[in-house]
Amino acid sequence: MNIRRLTLSSVFVLALVGAAVADPVELPSRRPGYWEISIGHGSKAAFKMTVHACIDAATDKAMMEAGTSAMDEMCSDREVKREGDAWIWDTKCTMGPMKTSSHMVITGDFQSAYQMEISSDVTGLDAPEKTVMTHKGKWLSEACPAGVKPGDMQMPGGITINAGEMIDSLGVAKTPWQP
């Protein structure tokens, strides 16, 4: 899998996650603090990445709103429901030439942990593809490490991006992010 396809698939995942704000079944907010998020891509998680994120209420809200905005623009069809302890939604989305039909199941309490499993059929790129992604979030601590501010996402290789600043620069949040 090339990095372009992985990046585009990841954008869809972020849009799917954020959609809960606009739908009748709403995900709880994540507990503020320092989170570890493990991402696996591929049927046997052939690609794995771990990200550390400093989350506060403003960051969580901005990410949800950005996802909602993206969903409103990209997804023509979505069904959201709650079944027991799981949030489930099925979507059909389009981003440029790429079209996806996805099924996502989210479980967890969002205070100590959560897990997402997303299976998608993707068309419109080099070749049709069935993708499987997992995201596992685990709360590590109330305080973020020194020098890490709310919205910072520490990527592999020592790269840090600030989700709130990125969302503001893209103009996809309904309200500006405030650290």
Image (spheres, rainbow, N blue to C red):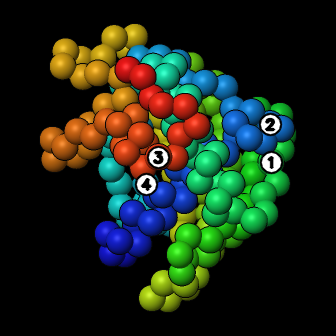
State which mark lies toward you, 3 or 2: 3
Q: Amino acid at mark 4?
A: Gly
Side (left or right) of 66 relative to 165: right
Distance from disc 3 to disc 4, alpha carbons, whole Å, reads 28 Å
Asked if 154 appears above or below 179 in the picture, the reply is: below
Image quarter of the N terminus: bottom left
Choose the circle earlier in sequence order: 2 or 4: 2
Seen at 41% across and 40% down, the residue is 168
Residue under pointer 4? 40
- CA gap, disc 1 to disc 3? 26 Å
- Pointer 3 residue: 171
The kind of residue tagged 3 is Gly
**What x and y, as percent, mark residue 165?**
35, 37
Give the residue pinned by disc 2: 25
Between 107 and 175, the one lying in front of the other is 175
The answer for how far apart the CA atoms under marks 1 and 2 are is 6 Å
Asked if disc 1 and disc 2 are in contact, CB closer than 8 Å, the reply is: yes
